[in-house]
Amino acid sequence: MNTTGKVTGIVSNLVTVQTDGPVAENELCYINVGGTQLLAEVIKVNADKASVQVFESTRGLKNGDSVEFLGKMLEATLGPGLLSSVYDGLENNLATMTGVFLKRGEYTDPLDHGKLWDFTPIAKAGDKVIAADWLGEVREGWLPHKIMVPFSFKGNYTVESIVEAGQYNIDAVIAVLKDESGDRIDVTMTQRWPVKIAVKNYREKPRPTRIMETGLRVMDTFNPIAEGGTGFIPGPFGCGKTVLQHAIAKQGEADVIVMAACGERANEVVEIFTEFPELVDPHTGRKLMERTTIICNTSNMPVAAREASVYTAMTICEYYRAMGLRCLLLADSTSRWAQALREMSNRMEELPGADAFPVDLSSIISNFYARAGMVILNNGQTGAVTFIGTVSPAGGNLKEPVTESTKKAARCFYALEQNRADQKRYPAVNPIDSYSKYLEYPEIAGYLNEKIEKGWVEKVNKAKVLVRRGKEMADQINILGDDGVPMSYHEAFWKSEMIDFAFLQQDAFDPIDALCPFERQKFMLDLILDICDKQYEFEDYEKCRGYFKSLINALRQMNYTEFKSKAFEENFEKLQKLLSENGN
Ligand code: ADP
Ligand code: MG
């Protein structure tokens, strides 16, 4: 018999319940209010009192209303059909409902039970299997979707029988397994997993060994993110966080994309709804949505549902990772998630931490980022979840708790700057403050040496030093005036501007410039560094400025023409001509 209870107190979505038996933290319950059942989650237990957070409006709820505990935590339903779907944080299918919001007490099914999938068995009768082993495969769009031994199965099993290749719906029994005590268990194409618990469906999680190419020069060359790595993009409103994430989604080398949209305003989420399905995968020409799941939330959805969304998104990634796929999880913005945590903790009247965020904000964020990673599956194959979150610090203050906590958890940092965005220097990533800790990994440096060329990381460092030096010179010139500094200061400044304008800047909306493969990135960096290696003797700083401006123009024109095309070669010749004049 499940534990039941009675409502004894209500503060907005936070409800206190007098219980008649044991309940666990994070356990779910239904609260009965006038014929409707509201889903809620236990967030604190104190003797026979449980504080539960209701996932929707508590309007009409009163003391004495009955509560039924479910004996399980918030779970995600996993199975074929997740891709190209749009869900809310509780995995309600937003496409099957009218409008953006569900009616209270309405929960929809995340997967289509009628649809038939072409199933091909992988395992055969007599095989010994454990949780997450592959039993069979269906095609989801053009991706192979593995049907696995449910992650919750503990111990060893023997495949007693498996169905023949054919068409089945997700509820059909595709295999019967026998456990160690001889009990038989049916396996279908779906399984469930509690979203707040990291799935351990792999053999080991070693350090990442390769880069996830994005076609973005600020990332791939300057601060690459590893496949299975973590990164975050802090930036004030309007600096290009969403544009950058969309570019990464479109171009990143990943099989599956999960987009957790925790919007501030409903219209930001509507944007995702309308824009994302239109995005075209430049690698295949197909709709990006075919291999994407969107989890949507707006701040007018109740906090607990908002809080759940990033966990649901991560669980879906962990599911696809166990199929040997490369997943990319994007969360925009994680600040909204942190704000949901803050609202909940404040209602609980917990002792607050910095800026009234919960005291354990840092560990909540770290534990979440730690679920990303490259893994080696039980069968020796690899899979990855790469996670990139945005943070929207109020007023661009990078010292606020969410940014600081995320900085501890994520290994790449792409700082978007108001200043750069104001000057329309896109992507507005500050090249000096941003970093990728993966460049310090010997595995990654080795990978880059192999993939691009020996000494690549040193070359990139050289470019970074030139940029930093240029900014220092700019400060000096600002203080002492154009005539108050030696010509070498001007030269250093303009060399850094060349790297900044012709290499770091990239137009996300230009069909050619938007996607810059590694080969092209290397070509441009080599070209620019060669120019930087040259010594000049300018008569005056006007000459210096004019010369570099014309070089920057020529380089940018190259960026806008197809690599190695005739137009590209012509622009390259123009540049060579300028170089031969050497500014004099
Ligand atoms: P945020 O999500 O940080 O609020 P957005 O991503 O919506 O900001 O960007 C705001 C605007 O800045 C975009 O609508 C676009 O006009 C411009 N922008 C941002 N990044 C780029 C880019 N890489 N290339 C061109 N324009 C950009
Ligand atoms: Mg945005």
Image (tube, grey):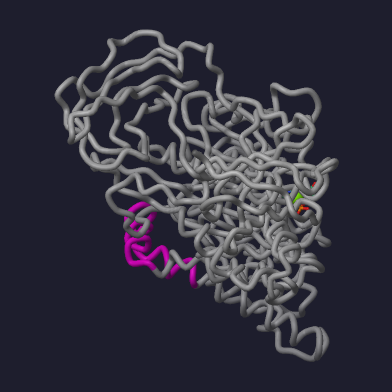
Magenta segment boundaries in residue numbering: 441-461
Percent across and percent down for residue 122 are 26, 23
Find the residue positioned furthest to the top. Answer: 166
Is 146 positioned to the left or the right of 219 in the image? left
- Front-most of 237 and 446? 237
* Residue drawn at (42%, 20%) of the image: 139
Q: Check the image and report above or below for 140 versus 572.
A: above
Give the image location of residue 383, x and y in percent: 37, 43
Q: Is residue 210 above or below residue 132?
A: below
Say which quarter of the image contains residue 395: bottom right
Image quadrant containing the C terminus: bottom right
* Count of numbered tags: 0
Residue 168 lies left or right of residue 19; in this view the side is left
Residue at 50 percent across and 21 percent down: it is: 141
Residue 475 at what x, y percent from top left? 75, 84
Q: Main secondary structure of the magenta part?
A: helix
Q: What residue lies at 71% left-to-right and 88% top-to-bottom?
A: 486
Quick one: 161 or 428, which is closer to the camera? Answer: 161
Name the outermost residue toward the left. Answer: 126
Task: From the viewer's perspective, tell me whether residue 480 is left or right of residue 77.
Answer: right
Does the magenta portion include 55? no
* 360 vs 105: above or below: below
Is residue 554 something one can see in this rendering? no
| Magenta region includes residue 444 | yes
Q: Quadrant of residue 487?
A: bottom right
Q: Using the image as rendered, state which of residue 527 and residue 38 is in the foreground.
A: 38
Q: Is residue 166 visible?
A: yes
User: Who is closer to the viewer here, 437 or 256?
Assistant: 256
Q: Where residue 137 sits in the image (x, y, percent)?
A: 35, 22
